[in-house]
Image (spheres, helix red, strand yellow):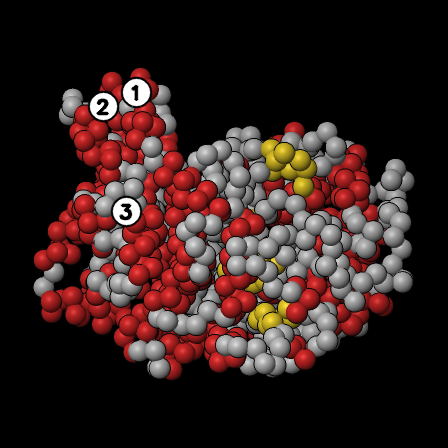
Amino acid sequence: MATVPQGYPRPGPLGQTDPLRWRLSSGTDGGRHVWHYTRDTDALETSSYEQVWGDDKERVRDRKEPDDETAYWLGLQLPRLDNVDSEPAQTPYDAAKKGYDFYKRLQSADGHWSGEYGGPMFLLPGIIIAMYVTKTPIPSEWRIEIARYLANMQRDGGEDDQGWGIHFEAKSSVFGTGLNYVVLRLLGVGPDEPMMIRARNSLHKMGERVREREWLSGVATDQRVSLGCTKAVANRFPRESARHCMCPPDWLSQVDRVAHFLLPETAFHRWGKFWLAILNVHSWRGLNPTPAELWLLPDWLPIHPWKWWIHTRNVYIPMGYLSGKGFQCEEDELIRSLRQELYTQPYDSIPWPSLRNSISPYDVYSPHSRVAEACFAVLDVYDRVAPSFIRTKALERAYRLVVMEDENTSYQTVGPVSKAMNMLCRWVEEGPESDAFQQHVAKIRDFMWMTKDGMLMTGTNGSQLWDAAFIAQALYGSDLASVPSNHASTAKLLEWLDEAQIQTNPKHFERAYRHRSKGAWPFSTKEQSYTVSDCTAEGMKSVILLQRFPHLSERISYERLCDSVDTILSLQNPSGGFASYELIRGSPLLELLNPAEVFANIMIEYPYVECTTACVTALSVFSSKYPKYRVEEIRTASKQAIDWIKTAQRPDGSWYGSWGICFTYATMFSVESLALAGETYGNSDHARRACDFIIGKQMNDGGWGESYKSCETEQYVHNEKSQVVNTAWAIITLLAAQYPDPEPVRRGCRLIMSRQLPDGSWPQESIEGVFNKNAAISYPNFKFSWTINALGQAWKKLPRDGW
């Protein structure tokens, strides 16, 4: 029976639930993850419990105790199995086998692996604000555990670092601190709680006038636009650059006159201002509009939103609808109190229009361009004088797009930010009793994930396919799939991969500006429905590799695999590279209009070496099995892709990673592509330089460790200590390139083996993933899939002596 270990994370301001009463349902509906709490039969709030939690198809609440899967993700002590040797493994293969023997215990009943997909600290505020505004009941267990999670994630740095950052490893920011403070208040935490006082003081400390003036005096000329200069101070250019400023000579004194109002509480990131405006603790006049009228423009215009990146356009559609309506929550006592708590000056005295472009230096990563500021000024004027008949037509158009997105994704939407916004749109338009709104409420639970630290909101409804594909390839690469004791596990995995494939195009296909999805695999579940290039590739590759084993039947037909190939080929861009969800539709010049100051490269799709390699390797695996299908197209596509990957290599031999951390991750993928073309350390300058880069980053203990800061700075930054996941990626890189010296690989394997726990698992280390350069996100299953893969490959490919 699972037990609560010593040192279990502390209660929060509202207390703590009993961790032994939580149950995870993950074996139904194609991999949906729903956490249930086994309440007493006479518990209060039964109706709200059922409304938000819904049916218990697996009857997990009837289980007397949590199973291994549930217990592991709760951080409980799993019961020890008698057949597990607690002594350290002696070879990489033994360590890989021991690791998978443990990992099998976590496999869901339907064959996939569940897992936390957390990290960003800006997701909970949207759904909690939406639930508060729509009066959707929040179960008491959720209130308790969300508050506990935020308490356990609260930083304890300097006086300006007592809040929350953009993700849980980042320093405090106005965006993270202000919004999560609001979440806690909406959940019922009082303003006089010690943690709230710390957070509020930190929020206010971040905006001290003296510090702002000091930074402003050193802002570079090309970053200044009138008094909108404040947004660029995070760059902290040398003070002497101020003498080149083309602003009026008295610009600094002008800033002095308004500095009182440029405190962080009025200098939120664009999305933060949006949610505060919805809650009625911020004015709509204080943020730049992105009007729904943009969707009335002709599709052929270069700036039309259908050319934007999928996540960006799906956020700004409901934003445009809600801001166009000027919707705000009804004022109540809590809202009036928040207006006093968040701001250091009277709410009614804040000059909102002058703050549209203000952003705290603690938050800014991608400052507004002058082009963007000019466009925002024009849109602001239009927003105030928009003809009602045009505004009405624009709102109808935006709402229709919201409806199509909901119906295409079964009310999941592409991600949690748009999920909360769409849910609010449906409530505003159709009311709380409408089927659409109730469908949204029913899918909230898919995003709520329980951990040892409390309850968080995930980055999508999970990473089910992504994790399943990588462990499938690890089982193939290590030959562990052929071990008789693993036959049942691999059969269940293949069955789940079979069911996860998307076999139709979206209900609203071209009208919703969607890319084809027939034959694709998603990032998470089939229900979510979005085509992702590398997920389709990794899914197809995993299926073909698993079906090579004689004990596994060929569940996915030739015709369905051809559909996958067709989808992959449809995603290649003229450059040869592959983007994420769809083809690149817009010009890079659209980045000049980026309104989201905390993220970079969000306006359009881009080609990624990770996506490109995944597609190339999948096409290669397919062609080896089915050599006659679209032979020339696959050959041409592969050559163009590998040629593009070469052009993306940096002078130091590395590649920049956009989805994992960071150079270690992308270099592994890129070298795998080179190996397909027969380019290895011995015959390729590209492969040789890549290996030299990786070797140069090996740490004294034999491992590799890279920080998320690499993604932000675009320069390699060592982690404080080596990481088993980074080490696994480096090992696979050197093996793929046939690096001549086996000792660095052996040292890396020994490091991974030394970190393995007696039960076969590995402890969680630093965060593994990233998106939009500045937002890190967790992939805790990586510490199993990639370590098992690296250890297994090393054992197969290196001489057996020397270990």
Residue on which the image places disc 1:
241
Residue 85 percent location from the top left of the image:
89, 55
* Residue at position x 61%, y 40% in the image: 664
First in sequence, mark 2 or 3: give its number.
2
For the N terminus, give its image quadrant: bottom right
Disc 2/disc 3 C-alpha distance (Å): 23 Å
Q: Nearer the viewer, mark 2 or mark 3?
A: 2
Secondary-structure class at tag 1: helix
Q: Is residue 265 above or below residue 503?
A: above
Looking at the rendering, which quadrant does residue 424 occupy?
Answer: bottom left
Categorize mark 2 by other alpha carbons within 10 Å: few (<14), some (14-19), many (20+): some
Residue 51 percent location from the top left of the image:
47, 78
Residue 178 percent location from the top left of the image:
39, 48
* Residue at position x 89%, y 63% in the image: 82
Residue type, numbered disc 1 = Ser
Secondary-structure class at tag 3: helix
Residue type, numbered disc 3 = Leu
In the picture provided, is 235 more to the left or to the right than 608? left
Residue on which the image places disc 2:
245
- Frontmost residue, 37 versus 195: 195
Disc 2/disc 1 C-alpha distance (Å): 7 Å
First in sequence, mark 3 or 1: give its number.
1
Residue 675 percent location from the top left of the image:
65, 46
Q: Which mark is residue 143?
A: none
* Residue at position x 57%, y 59% in the image: 15
Disc 3/disc 1 C-alpha distance (Å): 25 Å
Q: Is residue 574 above or below residue 799?
A: below
- Frontmost residue, 67 versus 799: 67
- Frontmost residue, 208 versus 547: 208
Q: Which mark is residue 593?
A: 3
Residue type, numbered disc 2 = Cys
